[in-house]
Amino acid sequence: MDFDHLTHVMRRLALEAGDRIMEVYNAPDFEVRSKSDDSPVTEADEAADALISEGLAEAFPQVALVTEEQAASHAQVVSTFLIVDPLDGTKEFVKRRGDFTVNIAYVEEGVPSRGVVYAPAKGRLFYTLADGRAVEEDGPFDKDRPGAQKPISVSVPDNRGLMVVASKSHRDQATDDYIARYAVRDMTSAGSSLKFCLVATGEADLYPRLGRTMEWDTAAGDAVLRAAGGEVVNFDDHTPFTYGKPGFANPFFIAYAPGVLLVKE
């Protein structure tokens, strides 16, 4: 894989998809439908998916592509592939909260090694460089010429008082009970894959997820977090979190900055 080319293409497609999404977001009204799993979908999801899928297929025709909005792509089981969630956080999008992201990742042998997370309503853009480092780019964002890039890295956590980030739309009692087992100095909430990015930048130390997710929800944020020095492990036994699973469904997981003393069940 030509990682310079991959970085350029993923970044450009994420920005272009963000523009399409914001056109819908800023419209007076838009239609919201329910998919077979009862999750919401909008024309923004579908337009962004079509744009990204076409761009990736043209640039990397030899690489398998898995995308949330194309059910046919979910049947393949591969260990190296591109994976896309064109609009992660549709519930936040529908409620016009702004906590939604465009997510594109490259998974190598089950590990997300490169990714881009773009939050167009918040003006935040995170991605991995060709050499594997993680950065946040300052806007305004030119499609073909990156602006100022700030290297990002995880915090050095203080276990006497951790900063925890949790889901906005999927918070439950089990999550609260787990968080209560840590010494927490403060908590914040965020939608979509932004939670990974807050750990990646050191704005949070710990992100536990005790709920249903799919690989396209997590791969890009996971890639950025790992590139920033963070880790993601399975919730139950703290073993490595992998991709390319049959059906692309994730188990519960914990994303964190190394140094956090994880609590085992």
Image (cartoon, rainbow, N blue to C red):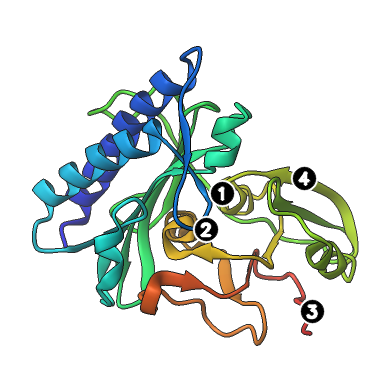
Q: Answer left or right for 51 relative to 198.
A: left
Q: How far apart are labels 1 and 4 at the CA level?
A: 13 Å
N-terminal label among 2 and 3: 2
Q: Amino acid at mark 3?
A: Val
Disc sitting over residue 225 in the figure: 2
* Rendering coords of residue 53 (x, y %): 22, 47
Q: How far apart are labels 1 and 2 at the CA level?
A: 6 Å
Q: Nearer the viewer, residue 239 or 129?
A: 239
**How would you rate the neighbour count of disc 3 (Cα within 10 Å): few for under 14, some for 14-19, many for 20 or more?**
few
Residue placed at 35% from the left, 24% from the top? 19
* Rendering coords of residue 133 (x, y %): 41, 55
Which of pointers 2 and 3 indicates the residue nearer the eye?
Answer: 3
* Element type at mark 2: helix
Q: Quadrant of residue 147?
A: top left
* Element type at mark 1: helix
Q: Is residue 119 above or below residue 132?
A: above
Q: Amino acid at mark 4?
A: Thr
Residue placed at 77% from the left, 84% from the top? 264
Disc sitting over residue 263 in the figure: 3
Q: Amino acid at mark 2?
A: Leu
Q: Are marks 1 and 2 in contact (CB under 8 Å)?
A: yes
N-terminal label among 1 and 3: 1
Q: Quadrant of residue 2?
A: bottom left
N-terminal label among 1 and 2: 1
Residue bearing mark 1 = 197
Q: Amino acid at mark 1?
A: Cys
Disc sitting over residue 188 in the figure: 4
N-terminal label among 3 and 4: 4
